[in-house]
Image (cartoon, helix red, strand yellow):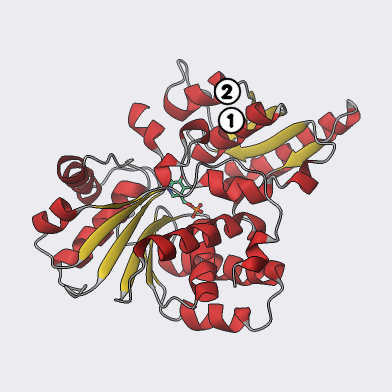
Amino acid sequence: MLTRLDAVPRTKLASVPTPLIAVPSLAAHLDTGARIFVKADDRTGLGLGGNKVRKLEYELAPERLAGVTELVTAGGPHSNHCRVVAAAAAQLGLRCTLVINGEAEDPARGNAHLHRLLGARIVTVPERDDRDPAMEEEARRVGAAGGRALVVPVGASTPRGALGYVHAAAEMHRQLDSRTRVWIFVSTSSGGTLGGLILGCALLDWPVRLVGVSADEPAALTKDKAVGLALDAARLLGHEGLADSVRALSDSVVTTDAFVGEGYGAATPAGDEAARVFGARTGLILDPVYTAKAAAAMIAWLRRGRIPASDRVIFVHTGGHPALFR
Ligand SMILES: *Cc1c(COP(=O)(O)O)cnc(C)c1O
C-alpha cells in the first residue's frame, strides 16, 4: 500500500523515523492502565524541527524546485512554519522571503528572532488577509528580477504537504506493532497533519481513534479541513477506493475545540498543567500554543476514564519549542 507513497518524489529534509517513546511514569501518574507513547516529531531536525519539516519534504519536492531561486511564504510573527521554510531555503541554497502579519517586535525573540537568524527577508503586512496578495506580489518581484519564486501556502497544509503525515502514520504503525486499539492525540490548526494521519491510517487499514485538538478554530471546521486535505491527498496517490476508506475512517475522527481557551496562543490553566505534568513525569517539554493544549485534552480523556486500560495512546509531539522563549 505504501509503494504509491514511495513513488511520490520528495526532498529529504527530516531526520526520520522519529522515536516513539514509552512514558510509563506518565501513565502511572494518571492512574491509567493504558500504555502511553509520545511520537517525538519535535525531533525532525531541520531548523529546530516540528511537524512542518515532514510537510515541506513534499511541498519542496525536486520537480517543484526546478529553476527556483527563492521561497516565499507567510505566517504570524511567531510562526513555526516560517522558521522551517527559512531553514529549508538556507539549506537548499535559496533565498527566502517571509510575509509576516502584525508589528515587527524589537528586540525579536523566539521564532521572530530565528526567522532573522536564518537569513530570511521579512516583509510585514497589517492583517492576515493581506498575506496572500503580498506573497503574490513578492513572487512577481522575484520574477521581474530574473529569478523564480516558489510560493509555499501558509502552514504547508496542502494535499501534497499532508503526505508527510502519511509517512508518520506508517512509522507509528511499524514502531508500535500492536493489535490492541490505538488512540492518537494530535494538535490541529491548518489541518495538514491530522489530514495526513487520517489518510495514512486509511491506507494502512489501521482503525485508529484519531483525536484532533484544535489550537484555534471551531472543531467542525478543523475536521472539515483535515478530511478535505486527506481526500485531496488520496487523489494524489491515485488509488481507487482509498477515498472510501478515508470517508469511513473519518466518521470515527473526533476534533475538539474545548482546549483553545481565549484563543490562538493564549495560555490556559489546563495547558499549563499539562506542560508541567509532561515535564515532571516524562522529561519532555511541550510548547504553550499547540502541544500543551493537545496534551491537556489527552490527560482529560484519560482522567475521565474514556480510554480503556487495554488500549494504547500515542501523543504526537508536533514541536513549537521556540514559543517558550518569546
Ligand atoms: C503548525 C503546528 C501545528 C498544527 O499543524 P497543522 O498541520 O497546521 O494542523 C501543531 N503543532 C505545532 C507545534 C505547529 O507548529
Q: Which residue in the rendered view is the most extreme toward the top? A: 107
- Confirm whether residue 235 shows in the render: yes
Measuring from the top left, give residue 140's x and y in whole percent: 84, 35
- Quarter of the picture containing the C terminus is top left
| Closer-to-camera residue (217/62) | 62
Q: How many marks?
A: 2
Residue shown at the point (91%, 28%) measured from the top left: 146
Q: Is residue 316 left or right of residue 116?
A: left
- Quarter of the picture containing the N terminus is bottom right
Q: CA distance from mark 1 to mark 2?
A: 6 Å
Give the residue type at disc 1.
Ala
| Closer-to-camera residue (124/279) | 279
Q: Are marks 1 and 2 in contact (CB under 8 Å)?
A: yes
Residue neighbourhood size for the residue with mark 2, other residues' Cα within 10 Å, grouped as few (<14), some (14–19), many (≥20): some
Residue shown at the point (60%, 59%) measured from the top left: 163
Measuring from the top left, give residue 30's x and y in whole percent: 12, 58
Measuring from the top left, give residue 209's x and y in whole percent: 36, 73
Give the residue type at disc 2.
Leu
Which mark is on residue 118? 2
The correct choice, above or below, for 231 with respect to 172 in the image is: below
Q: Is residue 23 left or right of residue 11?
A: left
Question: Which image quadrant for residue 303?
Answer: bottom left
Q: Which tag, 1 or 2, sits closer to the chain's start?
A: 1
Measuring from the top left, give residue 252's x and y in whole percent: 40, 79
Q: Which residue is mark 1?
A: 87
Question: Which image quadrant for residue 305?
Answer: bottom left
